[in-house]
Image (tube, rainbow, N blue to C red):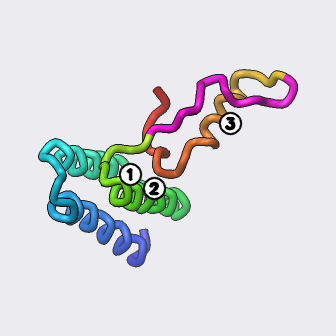
């Protein structure tokens, strides 16, 4: 990891904690606890990344989640309403093609969440 990337990651990490502990006064204790736990979990999960592209994707996801959370005043990720078999493929494609299309259709702020 380069020094610039490390500084970006650390500044985002600090920014999230500052938001959790003071940016929005009407946050409840459970919302703050969720923000802290989610941040710690995702940053620890991704601390071993060395590929610059994957690090940039994680940074973009973090920034998107921060902006969406501040805009909607809700720390939880916004759901997507995409049925499991709702994507059309060309001429009745196979299940793997639909799964790949579903993964590609997932918004940037939900990339770290597993499919349920």
Q: Residue at x 28, y 52 (%)?
A: 39
Which is more toward the observer, 9 or 91? 91
Residue 113, placed above or below residue 19 = above
Give the structural element (helix, strand or loop) at label 1: loop
Q: Residue at x 12, y 46 (%)?
A: 29
Local crowd size for mark 2, using a 10 Å CA cut-off: few (<14), some (14–19), many (≥20): some
Considering every residue shown, the one lying at the far right of the view is 91
Discs 3, 1 touching: Cβ within 8 Å: no
Give the structural element (helix, strand or loop) at label 3: helix
User: So how many labels did they put on this image?
Assistant: 3
Identify the residue position indicated by label 3 in the image: 101
- The quadrant the N terminus occupies is bottom left
The residues colored magenta run: 79-91
Q: Residue at x 49, y 31 (%)?
A: 115
Identify the residue position indicated by label 2 in the image: 61
Which is more toward the observer, 104 or 27? 27
- Spot occupied by residue 22 in the image (x, y as percentages of width and height): 16, 64
Identify the residue position indicated by label 1 in the image: 46
């Amino acid at each position: 990891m380069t020094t610039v990337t490390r500084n970006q990651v650390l500044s985002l990490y600090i920014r999230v904690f500052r938001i959790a502990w003071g940016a929005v006064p009407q946050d409840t204790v459970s919302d703050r606890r969720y923000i802290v736990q989610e941040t710690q979990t995702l940053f620890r999960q991704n601390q071993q990344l060395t590929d610059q592209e994957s690090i940039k994707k994680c940074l973009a996801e973090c920034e998107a989640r921060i902006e969406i959370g501040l805009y909607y005043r809700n720390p939880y990720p916004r759901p997507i309403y995409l049925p499991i078999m709702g994507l059309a493929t060309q001429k009745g494609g196979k299940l793997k093609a639909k799964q790949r299309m579903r993964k590609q259709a997932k918004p940037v702020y939900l990339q770290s969440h597993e499919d349920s």
